[in-house]
């Protein structure tokens, strides 16, 4: 009868309408992220919210068009190294444990398909991820930020955003860069390793102990951290007397104030590194080359450090490598003038 | 009491001498004990010392300025604390009560965030301390209350809270990878980077601050009687108050701009001195100065020798000062009187 | 000496909160003036305004002919000393230190007490028989001893005029008498003493003049026999009294008037 058919179709429609939301979004797969959390991802991921500076650099390198915004604004000196359309992306704030500045409503208004966080993985961050995910209904991925897992992270983001080819290419590039440096420095016996002091802060007395994330790249470039004998740990302060005793052969710093002052300072002047002019200010445009933020920006620091620490061993063209790196990862080839600025402090400058 | 004071002064001077010698001899850089003596002798006689120039640089170029800085800052903070305790008629007062440390800290934080050279950071810190107290004094003068001291203290608390909020905001906005660690280390207090240039600025400020306190030493005693009684006895309390606040602020701002925030000295040392020589400021001031200098020198020597890394000075003075204060409170029968 | 402290049509109190009006009173060296008045009648506020510790709300105060408000504190302190009611104090100064503080007005701007100042202080302590307490902690002696020490401080200050605010308030009978004897000795030595008291008998004992202050106004300024009358006591304190002359020395027939309250 007509009425029965009408009722049947109405019933089917009702049943279809009441099917769970999951069916509508077509879950592609469940990913288990680095914290062991099972995360359900949507079919297409075109909008990625990066939860912290390391994540934003990672996503920018692999899938720049999927990146919704940055966590902190760029300084004037940093903008020229990034194509304008990406540099102009909005600043959305940080969503990780290292001081949240993001408003959850801002996150929601940006309508991301997934939130990606790249860095330390522990219970605190995992629970933070769960909370944000529950609150916003947006899947939250935690990726392992350790140096060795960098290629994996690149591949994963590539797959996530439909940029598998680029992800794979970058992963291989990262692996080759790291291996290239490791091979060359592996042969150096410990006694011949260059003793390097890494000075942070305006007085240059903040440094990283053994095993700290600050020294990771320096260790891989074959440098011997003079502060390692003071123990394992993170960032600490030491005294000038301590540095004088260590008498490093090379000083690397990230602070322009310290760099400008150290070569004229009478007390620092007695250190071997200062006498031979081997004091190097690590470039930081658009992102630091040595330690912070702890993301793939550190890759370019590896060969740079190789050249700084072992100039006899690293004779290949640093300039070409840097230009290539910037093009691959930051999507803009630096101009010759920009390259000059970046590499200005790579060579030793013996004082008169 | 006079004989006892003389004994205390002699003992403290002896302690100072020992502390200075110890400070010059110990440290991360290996220096043989005989070297220090040889170097000192050479300085006095003018003859060559026979010690390697590197060692001479360590002893006179690195440790020397650090020792002098510790002595000056310890003396400054203790003197400021002793004067303020009389001025505010309260033995629980420290030199920070009018907000000088907060102002100096904010100045330094701003300097770090603007990536200024160290000299500018210190200059900003110094000015910040002076401006903060000036603000407190202006606020207190604008409020017409019966008790000028109470109004000062309240204004100090308010301005201090405001400055604390500004510092917290700065830390929030600072770059967490580069600026924030630098700010944190600075705020914890340290003499790790004490250089002769620092002394050239701080030492005169400390001496200039001590002079009015010494000249007014007798009248500062009368401040503890309260404003009215002191005036009835012939003291121009407003002038003495301004002089005390100006001196203490000058010294404390200079101290904080060099060493960061170092607490407890201005609170504990005057107490200790008072139990030794009594409250008479003519005796209390020199005793506090000597004890404060020795104490900070010893603590700073520990800060750079206990571990292979530097222990922040503010942390160490708290760890040592608090039990000392408690022990002294418990021991003395009459509380702090 | 020729010292003179005058209040001329003095209005005293706090801004927006007047306490007294139009009081004209003078004190000369060599005389004792007792100020009688009820609690809350404005005696303390009057004293503080008289000494320049509170700004006058109207009228003025003259010290040796000069306007007190224009004088430096040290100059005032050399002419007038103040004995407040004894208090505990915060820091454990010795009694000797406290008495020495009285010498401040005579010190140079940046000086500390000299040997001479110490001698004067010792003399003041001896005069009040407080020698045994010289090195005692001021905060730990009895209230009465503290009051005596403050009087010793005023003596050390060596000013020709002394203003005392209820100096016998916390003293036992014996100490009360001692203080009053000391007040009379001061006057005999040429000082002028203005003393606030709540006991009419003390006025009869030592005053040359009595000033009655009630409700912030000067109600009388006359020798004790004229000022202290049953009517005045009733008005001031709301108490009925009888006044009797008591013979204190049979030989000379000297009498002293006493004021005795009578019940309903």
Image (tube, coloured by chain):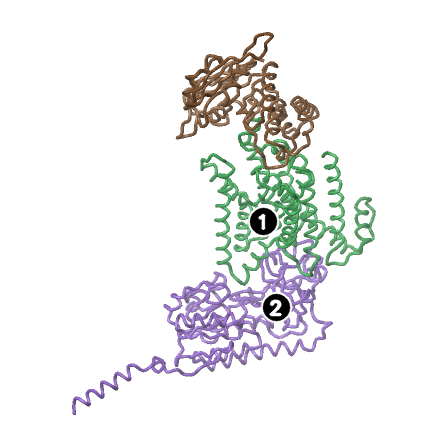
Chain colours: A purple, B green, C brown
Quarter the C terminus of chain C occupies: top left
**Residue A280 x %, y %:** 62, 63
**Residue A258 x %, y %:** 61, 57
Chain of residue at mark 1: B
The residue sitting at 68% across, 32% down in the picture is: C135
Say the numbered circle drawn on residue A212. Answer: 2
Instruction: Tell which of B183 and C247 is nearer to you.
Output: C247
Quarter the N terminus of chain C occupies: top right
Q: Is residue A218 above or below residue B183?
A: below
Q: Is residue A65 visible?
A: no
Instruction: Tell which of B219 and C130 is nearer to you.
Output: C130
Q: Nearer the viewer, mark 1 or mark 2?
A: 2
Q: Is residue A219 above or below residue B143?
A: below
**For the residue carrying disc 2, how many other residues have a C-alpha within 10 Å: few (<14), some (14-19), or many (20+)?**
some
- Residue where numbered disc 1 is placed: B122
Instruction: Tell which of B135 and C231 is nearer to you.
Output: C231
Q: Is residue C246 above or below residue A141?
A: above
**Residue C260 x %, y %:** 48, 19
Q: Secondary structure at mark 2?
A: loop
Q: Is residue C263 above or below residue A44?
A: above
Q: Secondary structure at mark 1?
A: helix
User: Which residue is at the far bottom?
Assistant: A1
């Amino acid at each position: 009868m007509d009425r029965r058919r009408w009722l049947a179709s109405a019933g089917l429609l009702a049943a279809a309408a009441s099917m769970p939301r999951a069916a509508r979004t077509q879950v592609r797969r469940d990913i288990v992220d680095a914290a062991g959390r099972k995360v359900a991802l949507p079919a297409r991921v075109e909008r990625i919210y990066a939860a912290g500076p390391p994540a934003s650099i990672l996503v920018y390198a692999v899938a720049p068009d999927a990146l919704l915004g940055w966590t902190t604004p760029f300084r004037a000196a940093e903008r020229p190294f990034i194509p304008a359309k990406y540099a102009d992306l909005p600043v959305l704030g940080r969503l990780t444990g290292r001081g949240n500045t993001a408003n959850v409503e801002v996150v929601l208004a940006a309508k991301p398909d997934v939130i990606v966080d790249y860095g330390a993985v522990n219970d605190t961050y995992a629970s933070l991820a769960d909370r944000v995910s529950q609150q916003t209904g947006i899947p939250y991925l935690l990726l392992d930020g350790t140096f060795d897992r960098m290629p994996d992270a690149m591949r994963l983001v590539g797959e996530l955003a439909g940029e598998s080819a680029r992800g794979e290419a970058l992963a291989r590039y990262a692996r080759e860069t790291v291996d290239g440096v490791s091979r060359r420095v592996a042969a150096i016996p410990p006694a011949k390793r260059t003793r390097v002091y890494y000075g942070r802060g305006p007085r240059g007395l903040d440094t990283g102990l053994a095993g700290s994330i600050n020294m990771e790249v320096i260790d891989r470039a074959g440098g011997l951290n003079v502060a390692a004998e003071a123990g394992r740990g993170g960032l600490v302060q030491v005294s000038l007397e301590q540095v004088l005793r260590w008498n490093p052969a090379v000083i690397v710093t990230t602070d322009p104030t310290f760099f400008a002052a150290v070569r004229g300072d009478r007390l620092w002047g007695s250190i071997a590194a200062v006498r031979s002019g081997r004091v190097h200010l690590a470039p930081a445009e658009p992102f630091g080359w040595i330690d912070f933020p702890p993301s793939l920006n550190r890759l370019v620091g590896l060969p740079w450090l190789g050249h700084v620490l072992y100039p006899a061993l690293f004779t290949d063209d640093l300039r070409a490598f840097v230009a290539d790196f910037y093009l691959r990862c930051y999507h803009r080839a630096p101009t010759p003038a920009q390259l000059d600025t970046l590499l200005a402090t790579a060579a030793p400058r013996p004082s008169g | 009491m006079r004989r006892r004071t003389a004994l205390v002064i002699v003992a403290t001077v002896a302690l100072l001498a020992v502390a200075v010698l110890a400070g010059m001899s110990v440290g991360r850089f290996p220096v043989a004990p005989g070297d220090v003596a040889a170097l000192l002798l050479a300085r006095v006689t003018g003859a060559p010392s026979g010690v390697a120039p590197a060692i001479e640089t360590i002893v006179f170029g690195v440790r020397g300025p650090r020792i002098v800085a510790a002595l000056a800052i310890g003396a400054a903070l203790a003197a400021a604390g002793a004067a303020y305790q009389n001025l505010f008629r309260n033995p629980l007062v420290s030199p920070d009560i009018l907000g000088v440390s907060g102002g100096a800290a904010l100045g330094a934080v701003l300097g770090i965030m603007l990536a200024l050279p160290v000299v500018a950071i210190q200059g900003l810190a110094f000015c910040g301390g002076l401006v903060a107290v000036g603000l407190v004094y202006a606020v207190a003068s604008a409020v017409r209350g019966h008790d000028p001291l109470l109004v000062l203290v309240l204004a100090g608390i308010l301005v201090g809270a405001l400055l604390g909020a500004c510092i917290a905001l700065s830390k929030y906005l600072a770059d967490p990878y580069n600026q924030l660690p630098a700010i944190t280390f600075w705020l914890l207090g340290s003499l790790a980077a004490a250089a002769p240039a620092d002394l050239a600025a701080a030492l005169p400020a400390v001496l200039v601050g001590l002079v009015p306190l010494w000249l007014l030493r007798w009248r500062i005693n009368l401040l503890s009687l309260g404003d009215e009684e002191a005036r009835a006895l012939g003291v121009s309390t407003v002038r003495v108050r301004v002089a005390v606040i100006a001196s203490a602020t000058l010294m404390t701002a200079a101290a904080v701009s060099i060493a960061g925030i170092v607490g407890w000295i201005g609170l504990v040392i005057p107490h200790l001195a008072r139990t030794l020589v009594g409250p008479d400021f003519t005796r209390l001031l020199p005793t506090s100065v000597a004890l404060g200098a020795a104490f900070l020198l010893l603590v700073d020597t520990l800060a750079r020798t206990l571990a292979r890394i530097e222990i922040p000075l503010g942390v160490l003075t708290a760890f040592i000062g608090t039990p000392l204060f408690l022990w002294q409170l418990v021991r003395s029968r009459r509380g702090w009187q | 000496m020729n010292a003179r402290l005058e209040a001329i049509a003095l209005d005293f109190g706090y801004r927006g909160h007047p306490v007294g009006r139009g009081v004209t009173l003078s004190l000369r060296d060599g005389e004792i003036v007792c100020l009688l008045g009820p609690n809350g009648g404005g005696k303390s506020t009057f004293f503080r305004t008289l000494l320049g510790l509170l700004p006058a709300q109207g009228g003025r105060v003259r010290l040796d002919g000069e306007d007190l408000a224009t004088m430096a504190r040290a100059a005032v302190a050399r002419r007038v000393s103040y004995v407040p009611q004894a208090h505990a104090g915060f820091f454990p100064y010795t009694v000797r230190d406290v008495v020495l503080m009285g010498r401040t007005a005579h010190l140079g701007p940046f000086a500390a007490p000299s040997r001479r100042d110490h001698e004067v202080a010792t003399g003041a302590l001896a005069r009040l028989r407080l020698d045994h307490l010289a090195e005692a902690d001021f905060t730990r002696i009895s209230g009465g001893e503290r009051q005596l020490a403050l009087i010793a401080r005023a003596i050390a200050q060596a000013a020709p005029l002394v203003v005392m605010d209820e100096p016998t308030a916390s003293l036992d009978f014996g100490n009360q008498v001692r203080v009053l004897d000391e007040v009379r000795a001061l006057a005999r030595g040429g000082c002028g003493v203005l003393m606030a008291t709540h006991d009419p008998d003390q006025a009869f004992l030592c005053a040359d003049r009595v000033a009655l202050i009630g409700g912030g106004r000067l109600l009388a300024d006359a020798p004790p026999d004229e000022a202290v009358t049953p009517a005045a006591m009733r008005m001031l304190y709301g108490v009925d009294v009888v006044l009797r002359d008591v013979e204190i020395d049979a030989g000379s027939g000297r009498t002293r008037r006493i004021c005795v309250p009578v019940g309903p």
